[in-house]
Amino acid sequence: MAELTRREVENLAAVSEGGGLNLACRDLSGLDFAGIDLRGANLTSANLTGANLAGLNLSVNPQTEVPATCVRAVLKGVNLATAHLSRVSFAGANLEGANLEGAQLEEANLSLEGEDFVVLRGANLKGANLRGANLTGADLTGADLTGADLTHASLYNAQLADAQLTDVKGYEG
């Protein structure tokens, strides 16, 4: 993986002007991404371990209508609190210990693998794909899962107090 600095990511983002920055297979561990526009970015297999992505906008690129992708990305311990992540794919991503409290994850693909113990407290997961996700020990307190797909998802020891579970597929509370 090629390592980048925050300054290099800022320069690349400025050049792409929201046009879908390609950061696939890059080592971005520990970087502070506050204030960087990564809408529609490709973060496939990127290493974002310990990065600060709080408040980040990774949602759909308005120019191309393409959402960002974090497929197989390493996001261990990452802070994505209040981040805009609508329609982002986290399929196969490692979100162990990640904080997604209050994140906007409408229609996102969170078919996570492994025991991630992810914090999704108060997150908006309307219509999200959580098929087969391992949410063992996840904190979903107050999360909105309206219309989400939890088919074959593991919710062992998950905290679901005050979670909205209207029209959830595959959930048998």
Image: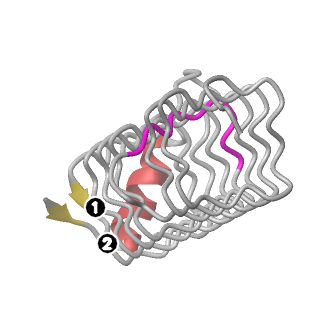
Residue 47 badge: 1
- Looking at the image, the residue that sits furthest to the front is 172
Cα distance between the residues tagged 2 and 1: 6 Å
Q: Is residue 57 above or below residue 101?
A: above
Horizontal and vertical percent for residue 139?
A: 64, 63
Q: Residue at x 37, y 40 (%)?
A: 42
Q: Quadrant of the C terminus?
A: top right
Q: Is residue 154 left or right of residue 168?
A: left
- Which portion, as a residue range, is magenta? 104-112
Secondary structure under tag 2 reads: loop
Secondary structure under tag 1 reads: loop
Q: Residue at x 86, y 55 (%)?
A: 162
Q: Is residue 28 left or right of residue 98?
A: left
CB of mark 2 within 8 Å of CB of mark 1?
yes
Crowd band around label 1 with a 10 angstrom C-alpha radius: few (<14), some (14–19), many (20+):
many
Of callouts 2 and 1, the N-terminal one: 2
Residue 159: name its quadrant: bottom right
Horizontal and vertical percent for residue 37?
A: 57, 52
Q: Residue at x 37, y 68 (%)?
A: 76
Count of all numbered marks drawn on residues in the image: 2
Which residue type carries mark 2?
Ser
Relative depth, front residue between 126 and 71 = 126
Q: Is residue 169 above or below residue 113?
A: above
Which residue is the site of mark 2? 29
Which residue type carries mark 1?
Asn
